[in-house]
Each structure stands twice: as C-alpha cells, then as structure tokens.
Amino acid sequence: MLRWFIPVALAWVVLPLYARGAADKMAPSIAVQTLDGKTVRLFETSGRVALVDFWASWCEPCKASFPALDALSSSLRERGVDVLAVNVDEKRKNADAFLARQPHTIRVLLDPRMSAAEAFKVNAIPTAFIIDQRGRIRFTHPAYGVEAIDIFRREIAGLLEETQH
C-alpha cells in the first residue's frame, strides 16, 4: 500500500484534473476476474467507448469517484459506453466490504496482482482511461477531482460524435 501512497497524494494535490492524449496507443486486452469469479478480457474492441477506472478501497479520492462513476455508467450505457471499475486491492475482502457499503450497478472487475494496472501503466490510484471505439486509449486521467465527471462526459461525447461523421 505504501508504494501507492505518494503517487496518490501527489495526484490529489495536482488538481485540477488533467488529461493526456495517448497518441493512439491501443488499450491492453488483459485477463481480469469478475466479482463472481469468471475470467474476462478487460478490454476488447467492441465498437463501444469505454472508461476504465483503476481504484482501491483504501483510496480517499476513489470513495468520492465511485458513486459518480456509477451514475455516469448508468446514464451512458444506452449510448454505447461501458464504464469498468477495476479494483486493485490485494485482499478481496477489502473490495467486498467497500462494495457492500456502496450500492452500485457499474461493472466491477478485480486485479489483485495489478497485472492489468501494470499493462495500462497506472502510476496513481485512481487513474481513468477513456478508450475509443477502435480500442485506442485517447485520454488518461491520473487523479480525480470534482470536475472529473464533466470532463469525462465531454471527452466521451466527442468520441461518440467521431463515429457519426
């Protein structure tokens, strides 16, 4: 947990939230587990926009971002957007305790060995990636602030418009 403390603290201080374009880097398609124990690919090109958020139960900004991301997921699902919450807790019981206190409909995936986090080159928790319909990482957000959801909405809307032209 200590190796994440400094990056998390720095990410929290570096607000307002910023995004970096990722120069058409393809999102890794790596195996993770669902809450019911099935193994799935974290991201496979599906023709849908995806927001992949890496979080942990001990992360203070994650406690604020999780319900906001859950609401975003509910509001955008029908428009072709998948929001995936990838938990990196080493102990499943910590994630389960967090989720028991937090009603949600967002799809939660488990990455206790942080293999997906490493494949995505996550340096801070939380970190969100917005991926276009062709599987390219278009935006990276290594922090969470009050303006994050509005930024996510704008970036996602832009990606959805790209397919209409």
Image (cartoon, rainbow, N blue to C red):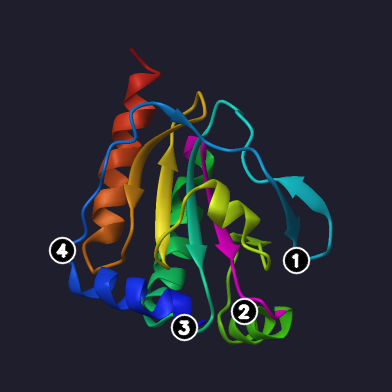
Residue that badge 3 annotates: 2
Nearer mark to the viewer, of 1 and 3:
3
- Secondary structure under badge 2? helix
Q: Are marks 3 and 2 in contact (CB under 8 Å)?
A: no
Cβ atoms under marks 2 and 1 closer than 8 Å? yes
Q: CA distance from mark 3 to mark 2?
A: 22 Å
Spatial CA distance of label 2 from label 1 is 10 Å
The image quarter containing residue 148 is bottom left
The image shows residue 136, relative to residue 20, as above or below, that is above
Q: Choose top left, top right, bottom left or bottom right for residue 142.
A: bottom left
Which disc is residue 16 wearing?
4
Mark earlier in primary sequence (4, 2): 4
Q: Which residue is mark 2?
A: 99
**Mark 2: which amino acid?**
Leu
Task: Identify the mark at residue 44; answer none if there is no mark.
Answer: none
Residue 35 is labelled as: 1
